C-alpha cells in the first residue's frame, strides 16, 4: 500500500493506492470514495451494530481508497518497520496495511492502565498506517534524558521505546483512563512524540452541540 495525501494540513485526505488483489484495513466511516471494483468487507461492529472497521480489497487491476477524518485537520502516515511498535490514541486510526496489528490491551500498557482498556492502543508489524490529526501535527523528538508532559487529549502517538508515566492532573478532578480526562502523560527520551494542535474530544463535543453531529 502506498499513501498519497492532499488538502493538508487543514482538511487532509489520504489516498491508499492498492496493488492488484491487495487489501487494506480502514475505518468504514472514514471512507470518502473508492475506485470502481474495490470490495468492502465489514471487519468489526461497534455499538448498535454500526460497522467500525472494514477490509477494502482491490480488484485484479488494482485500485484506490480515499479516507478522511471526521474532524478538520491533517492526516499523517506512520511507517512501521516491523521492529519497534507505536502507541497511538484510540480513535485516531484511519487506515493501515493488512500487515499492521492493533492491540488495545498490549502488555506494555499494564503499568499505565492496569487491566483496563485505556485511551491508547499499540500497533506493530510492518507497513503504512494513516492517522487522523485534529488540527496540525507537531513532531517532538526527545533526546536522551529530555522530559516533557503532554495532555492526553493532544497526544496522537509515541514510539513504544519512549518511557512514559501516567499521573493525575489533580486529586480533586475526575479521572478516566478510557478517555484521559483529568490525567497527564510524562515522557522521557530518547524517543519521538506526535502531538496534535487541537483537542479532538473537545472539538467533537462542540460540533455535536452545534449540530455538526447530525
Image (tube, grey):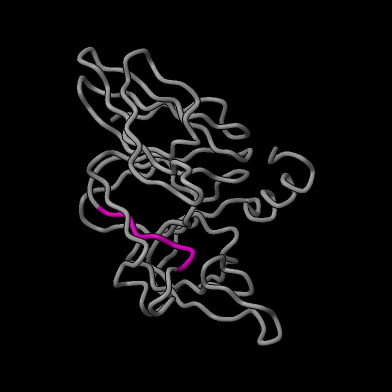
Q: Quadrant of residue 9?
A: top right
Q: Tell me, yes or no, whether the highlighted magenta stretch contains residue 97.
A: no
Identify the residue at horizontal 22%, vertical 27% (top origin). 22
* Above/below status of 33 relative to 103: above
Residue 77 in percent (x, y) is at 40, 40
Q: Position of residue 139 (x, y in %)?
A: 49, 51
Q: Quadrant of the N terminus?
A: top left
Residue at the front extreme, as displayed: 48
For the point 52% across and 72% down, the residue is 177
| Residue 189 visible in the current orientation | yes
Q: Residue 152 vs residue 5: left or right?
A: right
Q: Residue at x 42, y 59 (%)?
A: 158
Q: Is residue 122 magenta?
A: yes
Tally of marks:
0
Residue 46, above or below 12 = below
- Quadrant in which the C terminus is drawn: top right
| Residue 23 horizontal side relative to residue 72, left or right | left
Q: Farthest bottom residue?
A: 171
Q: Is residue 77 visible?
A: no
Question: As rendered, which of 193 and 111 lies closer to the eye?
Answer: 111
Q: Quadrant of residue 27?
A: top left
Q: Which residue occupies the foreground of this view, 94 or 115?
A: 115
Residue at image position (20%, 23%) is 21
Q: Which residues are magenta?
A: 118-124
**Magenta-colored segment: predominant secondary structure:** strand
Q: Where is residue 121 drawn, in percent x and y?
A: 39, 60
Q: Quadrant of residue 69?
A: top right
- Up the image or down, 100 lies above or below 54; here it is below
Amino acid at each position: 500500500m502506498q499513501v498519497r495525501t492532499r488538502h493538508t494540513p487543514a482538511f487532509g485526505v489520504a489516498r491508499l493506492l492498492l496493488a492488484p488483489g491487495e487489501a487494506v484495513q480502514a475505518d468504514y466511516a472514514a471512507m470518502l470514495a473508492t475506485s470502481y471494483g474495490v470490495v468492502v468487507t465489514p471487519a468489526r461492529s461497534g455499538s448498535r451494530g454500526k460497522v467500525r472497521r472494514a477490509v477494502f480489497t482491490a480488484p485484479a487491476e488494482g485500485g484506490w481508497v480515499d479516507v478522511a477524518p471526521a474532524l478538520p485537520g491533517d492526516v499523517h502516515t506512520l511507517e512501521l518497520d516491523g521492529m519497534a511498535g507505536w502507541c497511538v490514541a484510540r480513535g485516531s486510526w484511519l487506515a493501515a496495511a493488512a500487515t499492521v496489528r492493533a492491540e488495545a490491551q498490549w502488555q506494555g500498557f499494564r503499568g499505565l492502565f492496569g487491566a483496563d482498556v485505556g485511551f491508547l492502543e499499540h500497533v506493530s508489524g510492518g507497513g503504512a498506517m494513516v492517522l487522523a490529526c485534529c488540527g496540525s501535527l507537531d513532531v517532538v523528538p526527545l533526546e536522551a534524558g529530555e522530559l516533557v508532559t503532554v495532555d492526553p487529549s493532544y497526544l496522537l502517538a509515541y514510539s513504544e521505546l519512549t518511557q512514559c508515566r501516567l499521573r493525575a492532573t489533580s486529586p480533586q478532578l475526575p479521572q478516566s483512563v478510557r478517555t484521559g480526562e483529568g490525567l497527564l502523560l510524562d515522557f522521557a527520551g530518547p524517543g519521538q512524540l506526535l502531538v496534535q494542535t487541537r483537542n479532538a474530544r473537545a472539538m467533537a463535543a462542540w460540533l455535536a452541540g452545534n449540530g455538526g453531529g447530525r
